[in-house]
Image (cartoon, rainbow, N blue to C red):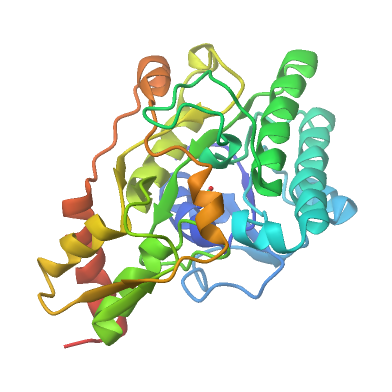
């Protein structure tokens, strides 16, 4: 068993729940301390230590780091793209303040490693949209994207100035059946599976040919842990790494679902999230992550859809 003591902030979110469960298997339940502003997620109950913590509470976070002898932090609390556009000031405050607090804590308490997620949202309409490279034009147009790009620069700054070992990934849209997404532009690709099983129909808030980069949660969790366990000398960039697995449109995911549920139908009613999606890449070039630390995705639209429907059916107890 490994010797780190890990603090997860934002443990009840879409990534948090699965990351806590995976890290507890690897590091031992008692060595992964889960926290969130919300009540404990039912899937975490009974699996290890849990505290209610506001990511904006610097003193509370510091006290918990001391109390639990924490050596690593994963900061996952954030407002995502769609929620962020409804209250830009709040999104900026939450996303930035929580990060800078954790980076300061990392320096002060000499933490061994920090993880903070970035996103494809750092890119904007002036970025090349197909196979978007690691280093390219970066002009985000959402407050979420601006906060993620600024955050990447802060991570790089703390690494260069204080030697803090902080690591980051630019996640594409993440698809999962265990935990629910919240407030993202890519959330349609999760909702569609739920609605397919419940109602056999789905109304997409993105238009039929809107291609976005996507990834199954299993790949995202494995990639995150592989990044965090890679030797420091392999981290040749301290901005976040592009990470990719697949790219599809609402029409294509619907066609894939139809292979399992032949009567499934999709309708399109694009809303304000269409504009956000139109400013993001269609597909991502992640060759730098592959080269530096050996990233390799496993799931495609086909095997992800089979897995999602199987697990969701069980979860929803649909016959
Ligand atoms: N899934 C995120 C969002 O839609 C992208 O990082 O906001």
Picture layout, residue 204 above or below residue 11: below
Q: Quadrant of residue 156?
A: top right
Rendered position, 266 above or below 167: below
Q: Nearer the viewer, residue 53 or 273?
A: 273
Quarter in which the N terminus is drawn: top left
Residue ID at (71%, 35%) = 151
Viewer-proximal residue, 179 or 40?
179
State the residue at coordinates (21%, 60%). 305
* Residue 119, horizontal then vertical, whole percent: 55, 41
The mark tally for this picture is 0
Between 54 and 2, the one nearer to me in the picture: 54
Location of the C terminus by quadrant is: bottom left
Camera-side residue of 247 and 229: 247
**Where in the figure is residue 82, as x and y percent of width and height?**
61, 60
What is the x, y in percent for residue 214?
Answer: 37, 47
Q: Is residue 243 above or below residue 311?
A: above
Does residue 45 sit above or below 120 in this rendering?
below
Q: Position of residue 167 (x, y in %)?
A: 59, 29
Residue shown at 37%/27% (left/top)? Answer: 131
Say which residue appears at 42% left-offset and 18% top-offset. 288
Residue 55 seen by the camera: no
Q: Is there any visible trace of residue 61 in the rendered image?
A: yes
């Amino acid at each position: 068993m490994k010797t780190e003591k890990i603090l997860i902030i934002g443990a009840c979110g879409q990534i948090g729940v699965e990351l806590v469960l995976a890290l507890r298997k690897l590091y031992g339940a008692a060595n992964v301390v889960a926290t969130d502003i919300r009540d404990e997620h039912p899937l975490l109950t009974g699996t290890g230590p849990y505290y209610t913590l506001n990511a904006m509470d610097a003193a509370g976070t510091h006290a918990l780091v001391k109390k639990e002898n924490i050596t690593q932090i994963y900061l996952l609390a954030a407002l995502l793209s769609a929620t962020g556009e409804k209250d830009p000031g709040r999104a900026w405050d939450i996303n930035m303040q929580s990060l800078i607090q954790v980076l300061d804590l990392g320096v002060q308490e000499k933490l061994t490693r920090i993880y903070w997620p970035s996103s494809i949202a750092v890119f904007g309409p002036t970025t090349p949209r197909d196979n978007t490279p690691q280093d390219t034009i970066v002009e985000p147009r959402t407050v979420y994207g601006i906060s993620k790009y600024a955050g990447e620069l802060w991570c790089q700054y703390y690494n260069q100035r204080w030697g803090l070992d902080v690591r980051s990934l630019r996640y594409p849209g993440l698809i999962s059946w265990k935990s629910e997404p919240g407030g993202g532009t890519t959330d349609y690709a999760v909702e569609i599976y739920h609605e397919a099983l419940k109602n056999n129909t789905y109304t997409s808030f993105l238009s039929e040919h809107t291609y976005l980069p996507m990834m199954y949660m299993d790949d995202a969790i494995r990639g995150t842990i592989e990044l965090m366990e890679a030797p420091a000398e392999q981290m040749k960039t301290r901005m976040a790494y592009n990470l990719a697995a697949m790219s599809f449109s609402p029409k294509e995911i619907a066609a894939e679902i139809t292979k399992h549920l032949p009567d499934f139908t999709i309708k399109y009613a694009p809303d304000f999230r269409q504009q956000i999606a139109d400013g993001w890449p269609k597909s991502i070039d992640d060759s730098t992550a592959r080269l530096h630390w050996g990233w390799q995705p496993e799931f495609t639209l086909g095997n992800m859809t089979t897995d999602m429907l199987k697990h969701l059916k069980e979860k929803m107890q649909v016959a």
